[in-house]
Amino acid sequence: MSEKKQPITITLPPELRSWAEEQVNAGKAPSISAVISEALSEKATRDRRARAALKARAAQADPERVRRMRAHVEAQAAALGFRVAPGE
Amino acid sequence: MSSPTPYIIDTGVLSDIARGDADLIGLMQDYDKTGQPLVVPVLAAVGALLDMPTEEASALLAGLTAFDSVEIAPLDGIEQAAKIADLIGRTGLSPWDAHVAAIADVAICPILTLDAGKWNEASGPLEDPLFTIEIADPDQ
């Protein structure tokens, strides 16, 4: 994957644009691009941590019990006439 | 071939996920791996987080909604607000589960719950019953 930064056009609500400009004017960021980039980076990190927290908890699950619960759910769905994704 | 019907997740299931129920989270992960669509009504998430107002709970629900197969259902205008209000008045459901019911009713999708009895009772006053599927371990 290329490391080169690519210019994009985004639309911001006025209050967020003002806040980003204030960050730059106060010397807290070199540019509006840097403010946006940092905010997206923090969001991406939060999402990764959240997914990791969920997967860590899922790793403690009893696979046999999960299988039984899923089969029980699918039997009910089939009886109601709903189409469901097949289990592994 | 038609797509799988999404399951609408109710507040009770989300509350137990927010509490960290490993088997329930494992079941959700299993659904994600196999492409079973799941819908999280945003008000049901509010109800779950009121029940469990911790950062870890928020992180677990955020992790759930980061799954590819999970879609967040936002509130959808005044028409839906009126439907939710009507459902609360007629069924006694909480606002959180009334959002679940409103989506399930319009989309004709089953509600995934840990308490089918609650939903059977709520369906009583409705012209068209809600479809519910109970998560349970038949061996326990």
Image (cartoon, rainbow, N blue to C red):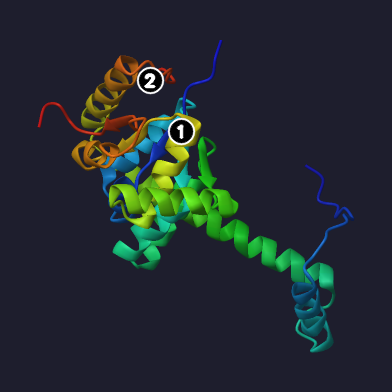
Quick check: B82 left or right of A14?
left
Are there few (<14), some (14-19), or many (20+) residues within 10 Å of tag 1? some
Where, by quadrant of the figure, is residue A35 drawn?
bottom right
Which residue is the site of mark 1?
A: B32
Q: Is residue B57 above or below residue A30?
A: above
Protein chain holding label 2: A
Label 2 amino acid? Gly
Q: Quadrant of the C terminus of chain A?
A: top left
Q: Is residue B47 above or below residue B40?
A: below
Quick check: B13 left or right of A20?
left
> Residue B91, position in %: x, y?
30, 47
Protein chain holding label 1: B
Are there few (<14), some (14-19), or many (20+) residues within 10 Å of tag 2? some
- Where disc 1 sits, the SS reads helix
Which disc number belongs to residue B43? Answer: none
Query: As rendered, which of B104 and B45 lies closer to the eye?
Result: B104
Whether residue A59 appears in this view of the structure is no
Q: Is residue A77 above or below residue B60?
A: above
Which residue is the site of mark 2?
A: A87
Q: Is residue A8 above or below residue A85?
A: below
Q: Residue at x 52, y 46 (%)?
A: B72
Q: CA distance from mark 1 to mark 2?
A: 10 Å
Label 1 amino acid? Asp
